[in-house]
Image: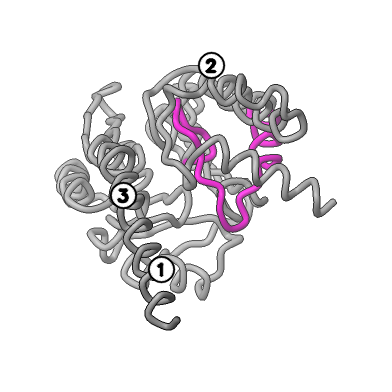
Amino acid sequence: MIKKIFKWIGIVVLVLVAVGATLYMIYLRPFMNKMKQVTTVQYDKDLTLVLGGGGNSGILVSDSLVIVIDTKQDDAAEQLSKQVLQLAGKKPILVINTHFHPDHTKGNKFYKGQSILVGGNYTKEFWMKEADKEVLPTLWLPTKMDIKMGDDTATIINLAQNIHTASDVMVYLHKRKMLFGGDVILNKQVPALFGVADPDGYLAAFDMLPKQFDIHYIIPGHGAVGGMEVIDNFRQYFLDMKTAATDESKKDELVAKYKDWAQIPLLMSPGRTITVFKDKAVKK
C-alpha cells in the first residue's frame, strides 16, 4: 500500500514538473526574453525614455537636477545607471519608484548617496520584507509634490489606495502633457493581481486621471508608449473581466478579445482577473 502511495506521489510530481516546464517554455521564457529587450527613445533634448529591461523608465534632466523614473533590473538596470550618471555629471539625482516590485527597483542599488522616493503608504518594514534593503528608499511621499524641471513641472502623485499595490506613484509632466503610469497602466499586457491589488482601484484611477491631468502621452509600466487609448483599452479590459465574472455565457467571448495581449497562465491572465472580481463579490 505504501509503495503504491509513493508511486502515485511520484507520478503527480512528474506531471507537475512537466506542466511547469511546458508553461515556462511556452509562456514565461518568451515573456521574460521580451521584457529584457531595451529601446531608447530621445523624446527631446532633456527627456530620454528607456523602454523595457524591466519597467519602462524615464530620464528627465534640468540645470540643477536629474529625475529617474524606475530603475529596472539585471543588466538593463546597470546600463541605465551608467546613462543617468553620464547625463547628471555633478547634479543630484532623484530616483522615483512607481512601486516596490523588483523590475522597477532593482537598479536602486546603483544610486548610492542619491534620493530615492516612493509612495508613503509603504513602511520601511514592508519595503525591507517585500523588496530588499539594498534598494531601500530615502523619501516617502504622503500625497504629491511638484518639482520645476527647466521649462516643465513634474507632479509626483501617490495614488494612496489599493490599485496595483498599496502605494502606486505616477509622474506627470505638465508642459509635455505626459504621464508615467507605472503598473497601474499597461499597454496590451494583462495585469498581475496579487496581494492588495484591486481591479476596482484600477477603474477608480482611470476615472480620476483624465479629470486631474491633461494627458496626451502615456508611458505605461510595460508596453509601448501611446495616448489616452492606452487607458481606455486597459479600462475596457477590467470592465470586460468584471462582466465575465458575473455572466458565464459571455466569458469565453470576452476573454478571447485579449488573446494577443502579453499574459502568463495563472499569474497574469484574464482568468486570474475574473477570479479576483469573483472573490471581491463574495466578500461584499
Identify whether 15 is placed above or below 129: above
Q: Nearer the viewer, mark 1 or mark 3?
A: 1
Mark 2 or mark 1: which comes first in sequence? 1
Query: In the image, what residue type sits under mark 1?
Result: Trp
Distance, label 2 to label 3, CA atoms, is 26 Å
**Cβ atoms at labels 2 and 3 below 8 Å apart:** no
Q: Is residue 153 magenta?
A: no
Q: Is residue 197 magenta?
A: yes
In the image, 202 versus 236, the foreground residue is: 236
Mark 2 or mark 3: which comes first in sequence? 3
Question: Which residue lies at the image location 34% right of the left edge and 69% below the top edge?
Answer: 10
User: What segment carries the magenta color?
Assistant: 183-209
Q: Nearer the viewer, mark 2 or mark 3?
A: 2
* Residue highlighted by disc 1: 8
* Residue highlighted by disc 3: 71
Asked if residue 116 lies left or right of residue 33, the reply is: right
* Residue highlighted by disc 2: 229
Q: Seen from this angle, which residue lies furthest bottom?
A: 2
Quadrant where the N terminus lies? bottom left
Asked if residue 89 lies left or right of residue 206, the reply is: left
On the image, the x and y values in percent for residue 151 come to 41, 27
Question: Which residue lies at the image location 58% right of the left edge and 58% below the top edge?
Answer: 195
Instruction: Place residue 166 in its image quadrant.
Output: bottom right
Circle 3 sits in a helix, a strand or a loop, which is it?
Answer: loop
Q: Nearer the viewer, mark 2 or mark 1?
A: 1
